[in-house]
Amino acid sequence: ELQRGVLGAEINLLETAHESARERVARLAAELAAKASSVLRLEEELKQAMLAASAQPPPVACNSVSSGTHASVQTEPRPETARPLKVDSFEQMPRTQVTPTRRKKK
């Protein structure tokens, strides 16, 4: 009889531990699903930002000139699938356009 009581208590402990483990697994699965959803959203935001950045023209470089003007140098816009340029000779480099503009007085 005593042995049956001890076994019954052990069974109750194991059932309680099992239920607790099932609840923890369910909670962790829900947290994982939320984090996966967040990662997917952030990946989409990053993709959109990269597309927007590649659609914008490159920044304008300015070189100071002693006459009080500066030149704006603009390169040809790169395609959306921008890759590093591989140039074998000077003639293959992208053409630039120089436009003198007035410098603002401070």
Image (cartoon, helix red, strand yellow):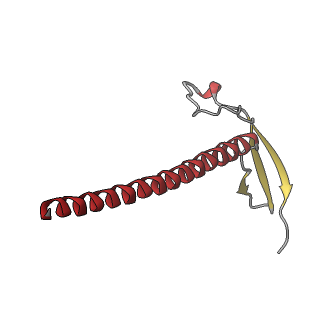
Residue most extreme to the front: 1
**Closer to the camera in the image, 63 or 81:** 81
Give the mark count: 0
Residue 79 location, quadrant: top right
Instruction: Locate residue 72, reporting x and y percent.
Output: 78, 50
Q: Residue at x 64, y 48 (%)?
A: 41
In the figure, 80 relative to 70: above or below? above
Q: Is residue 70 left or right of residue 21?
A: right
**Closer to the camera in the image, 57 or 50:** 50
Q: Residue at x 75, y 36 (%)?
A: 77
**Closer to the camera in the image, 81 or 3:** 3
Residue 91 location, quadrant: top right
Residue most extreme to the bottom: 106
Q: Report the quarter where the C terminus lies.
A: bottom right
**Closer to the camera in the image, 25 or 59:** 25
Q: Residue at x 72, y 45 (%)?
A: 58
Instruction: Locate residue 99, reporting x and y percent.
Output: 83, 46
Q: Is residue 95 left or right of residue 31?
A: right
Instruction: Locate residue 1, reporting x and y percent.
Output: 14, 62
Q: Is residue 16 left or right of residue 75?
A: left
Q: Residue at x 13, y 61 (%)?
A: 3
In the figure, 36 relative to 24: above or below? above
In the figure, 39 relative to 10: above or below? above
Instruction: Locate residue 84, reporting x and y percent.
Output: 57, 34
